[in-house]
Amino acid sequence: MSGPVLLVSFVAALGLGYLLQRRFEKTALIGLIFMLGSGVLALVMPKYNGFDMFNLFGLSMLFGFGISLADKRAKALKRQADFEAMKTARPQFKHCPSCRSPLAEREVDDKIRLACTHCTYVYWNNPLPVAAAIVPHNSGGIVLVKRGVEPRKGSWCLPAGFMEVGETPEQGAVREAGEEAKIKIEIERLIYTFAPPKTPQVLLFFVAKEIDQTPSPGSDATEARVFQLDELPEDMAFSSHVEAIKRWRQSVGR
Ligand SMILES: [Zn+2]
């Protein structure tokens, strides 16, 4: 094999590897250096036949690169699938909130994440805490609110909402019950926690002390009322709320 042919074929092989993975491996780089060295030798030394220890070493390096490429490709595909699943859970941000440079998909801590192309910002997509309350009423039922906003607008659920900075989860649950059902509650205990597999949230369900107030709808709710336990809506907004109510009923034997 002549020097120029060797050069062209291996540069082409590496170019293909680069397109497949968009990343040079150390092994491939070393292999390329040896192949190039061999090619140059063949060009400057007419008696050199173009295949020797240099080429052998270079070829084995490229072989190793091929294996690592296939392995990395399989892992990258899985990470990409994880990333795509994560995408649906949040709006896709395009720019760094710190320096306004474009965000790009990059592997950080073994997962593909959105990261800044200029500064060190990484969009971690950590779950947001949601505080919810099961509020027993002295008439025997519990308080539910009808959702006035998406998702699941028009369906019933427990008073719940995203925690705000500076408040405890319990204070968050108290505040949400005040905002959505206009009731003043006191938290008794935590009954259930849940993290949906695809939505970046952590739900904290508390049980409040029994109230005798009449709820009325506030922010984000179009209705707020007491439901008796045997007339709870069939089509509740979130299955995690149903599970929390179930666990509370089991715990109090009702
Ligand atoms: Zn940035």
Image: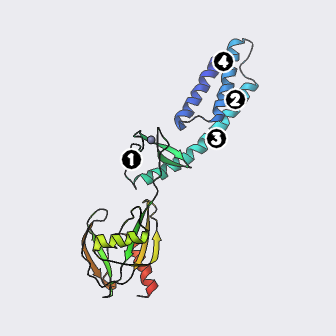
Left or right of 155 on screen, residue 163: right
Q: Residue at x 42, y 75 (%)?
A: 206
- For mark 2, what is the residue? 58
Q: Earlier in the sequence, mark 2 or mark 1?
A: 2
Q: Can residue 196 be seen in this view?
A: yes
> In the image, what residue type sits under mark 1?
Phe
Which numbered disc, 2 or 1, marks the residue closer to the eye? 1
Q: Residue at x 69, y 21 (%)?
A: 37
Disc assigned to residue 3: 4
Whole-Å distance between the Cαs marked 2 and 1? 43 Å
Point out the image quarter for the C terminus.
bottom left
Position of residue 107 measured from the top left corner of the image (x, y, whole percent): 53, 45
Nearer to us in this view, 241 or 202: 202
> In the image, what residue type sits under mark 3?
Ile
Left or right of 58 on screen, residue 248: left
Question: In the picture, residue 73 is in which quadrant?
Answer: top right
Question: Where 246 sits versus 69, above or below?
Answer: below
> In the image, what residue type sits under mark 4?
Gly
Tell me the SS state at disc 1.
loop
